[in-house]
Image: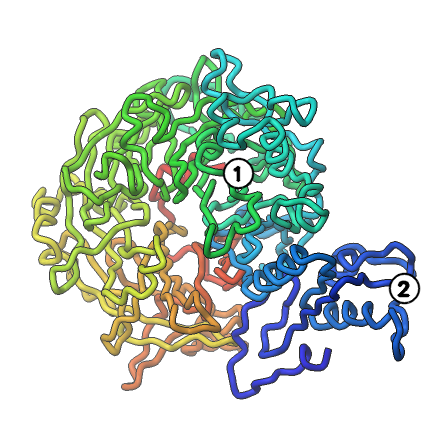
Amino acid sequence: MYYWLSDLRTNLDNEVPTSTEDPAFWQHMSTFTLGLGFSPTGITPSGTTVDQIFNWANGGAAISGFSWPQPSSDSIYNITDMAHAAVNGHGGFYSATSPDAFASALTDALKRVNERIGSGASLAANSTKLETGTVTYQATYYTGKWKGDLKAFTVNPSTGAISPTPSWTASTVLPSASSRVIKTYNPSAASGSQFVDFTAGATTTTAPPNLSSTQKTALGASAAEQNAVIAYLRGDASNEEKNGGTYRNRDTALGDIVDSQPVYVGAPDANAFFGKTFSGSSSYTTFAANKLNRSPRIYVAANDGMLHSFNASTGAEVFAYLPNAVILAGIKDLSDTNYGGTSLPHKYFNDGELTVADVYYSSAWHTVLVGTSGRGTAKAIYAFDITDPATPAFLWERSAGDGLTNSNYIGQIVGKPVIAQTADGSWSVLLGNGYNSTSDTAALLQFAITTGSLTVRTTSATTGNGLAGPAVWMNDATNGISTNAYAGDLTGTVWSFALSGTTGSTLFNAVDSTGAAQPITAGILAGKDPDTGALWLFFGTGKYLTQTNLADLSVQTWYGIIAQAGPSQPTNLVTHLSSGRSYLRQRSVVAEVASSDTSLGARAISAATAGDMANKSGWYVDLVPPSGTGKGERMVTPNQFQGSLLIGTSRVPESSDPCNPSGSGWIMAVNPFTGTANSTFFDINGDGLFDKDSDGNSNNSDKITDSSGNVYVVAGVGFSSVPNNPIFVGNTMLISFDNASTGDVGTKGSVGTLERLSWRELLGQ
């Protein structure tokens, strides 16, 4: 254990990636041992397995009365001491009783060595208030073995800090394979009977009873194989290699959760549609009152192929859905012992974002969930009525391969679905079509909320293209009807769509100072300037879709542009956008302090001067440090509002660092309509004060000073790991990082006058 506990290279920063089995973040040795033909013996109590001991060592159930046997010369107990060394060294022990078991042991050990824990999505919370009972939920993934988990953490009501110990972990309370409720969609079944149980046949040779012939073929060549794969996907481990079978070993049936953000759904907000006049708005408060005691759920998608619904209080899975398109995309591969290796790499089976909103149809209010398969080859979108979480009702599934009208426009959708009312009484799901569609062009997709029928609004004929997530806007907030959508594509074009039309029109082209196009892969955010009435769009540029994107050092930019001029403003504020940056006000990163393991980084953006936004069509900030040498910083997640501020999250990949392959990043806060930071927002030194000392005297403790002695308001905080988009609970900013750690930063709350900047926030649960 000495070589695990000791830092073997004290002259190196402690940046060693951690995992559940090996939490050491210092330079150390992990011990893996292999017994050839013999198994450990002599452990007390009798019957205790090495797997149980490792589970205990990794935080699982304790073993009462446990003890190791005493090794000695020529003793069979010396085999057991090899397992003891592996437990102490946070590695692994393998008992190889055959050539196949030997090969499997080596493969598993190599996967363990390569295993890294990560989190690619933002946290979720059950409240925006900092109070007793506030809980955050974090989804994680583990490379190598490609497993996942969902964990709940309480938030300290006094400090806003996230507890280091989860109150529940979903993988430890996952129901048994036979008792899980797992559904799928059989498009070949009779109408009204297409939402079916994903279960095996009554005997090993009886074909699965509810699946189409196409689904069965995708799962195996015979009924026996189909049933075995179904049992495996449901969580049955009896046919895994460790139990004498032929399927891939797993620690849990939960697959890796990479980019799907957990969504908390509890009681509806009775004020969500206050003041609206559309059909059903007058009855919404009654609907909300009737659902005050609705059992809360956490919904998230995982690369085991399933949408999962978890009890938010206990973490127990209560429902799962495996899309038809995911079955056909090769979900069987999860059982292959080579899965996750070079011959059969990891796949994104169901990795998309989810949206939940209350909608009105069939003369009643319903809570609807919409999800996508994300960057996986399934290219699917699905919708559920989750009004009653105990009995979710399937609405529809659409995919690129379903053969229905316009399915050729459906690509790998990485944006968050938007649920909006597009005509009085008519609700829709709006999405950018994503990437690698059969059409190979960018398009806005509009699905009818109850049927999934698809209307497409096209852009240009440019191929090799795709549309990111849209911002959807209502010109008259009182009627609740969305009229316009805006989205960006891989060529850097921002498209404007009238939802009454059939095609989009070019609003703006994002290019850097050399004229090179800047791809837009994150969703656009829309907000109205309360002073002028102008509609603004906010977004960043850059790609983070493939491995080759990591090494891209091209300059990317944060933009705020005017999409609709205010009543007293000249219309050329919009038409000037066709000239690119010429009519935008440039802001720059003027001072920066790097982050470390123990302190936040700090960044300043050049200040505004009186009147410098006059006749400007927006602003931009190139994401480069004061030195002017770009590091590949980019924005690939949507901006968000916090009070009267605009929040942008960036990441800086550092693929050349073997101990820190993910990189670093920044969370910035600026005035949406000037692109500058006017007053202190972040508590940089964590003292709970803002530019004051403990005696209440003003100082510059939360500001940044450059090499020339100039003092600036901090516009951004930096981190030594890549941050995902933050959430805010009270005045505390909570962050999940790509290494699965979490953090909290105090903020001053709203800066300036409170204004509601986006209608989309009203639809969230």
- Could you say where residue 38 lies in the image, as x and y percent from the top left? 80, 63
The secondary element bearing badge 2 is classed as: loop
Occupied quadrant, residue 648: bottom left
- Could you say where residue 464 lies in the image, as x and y percent from the top left? 21, 45
Bin the neighbour count of mark 1 within 10 Å (Cα to Cα): few under 14, some 14-19, many 20 and up: some
| Alpha carbon separation for disc pair 1 and 2 | 39 Å
Image height check: is 123 above or below 22? Answer: above
Q: Amino acid at mark 2?
A: Gly
Occupied quadrant, residue 111: bottom right
Which residue is more in the foreground, 438 or 462?
438
- Could you say where residue 635 lies in the image, as x and y percent from the top left? 32, 57
Q: Is residue 272 visible?
A: no
Image height check: is 593 above or below 373? Answer: below
Q: Quadrant of the N terminus?
A: bottom right
Q: Which residue is mark 1?
A: 332
Q: Earlier in the sequence, mark 1 or mark 2?
A: 2
Which residue is more in the foreground, 320 or 403?
403
Give the farthest residue toward the front: 99
In this rendering, the count of numbered labels is 2
User: Residue at image x 48%, y 73%?
Assistant: 659
User: Residue at image x 71%, y 32%?
Assistant: 178
Which residue is more in the foreground, 347 or 496?
347
User: Residue at image x 46%, y 35%?
Assistant: 326
Q: Left or right: where does residue 267 sit relative to residue 187? A: right
Which residue is more in the foreground, 609 or 357?
357
The secondary element bearing badge 1 is classed as: helix
Bin the neighbour count of mark 2 within 10 Å (Cα to Cα): few under 14, some 14-19, many 20 and up: some
Q: Amino acid at mark 1?
A: Lys
Occupied quadrant, residue 96: bottom right
Q: Left or right: where does residue 480 sit relative to residue 214? A: left
Q: Which residue is mark 2?
A: 42
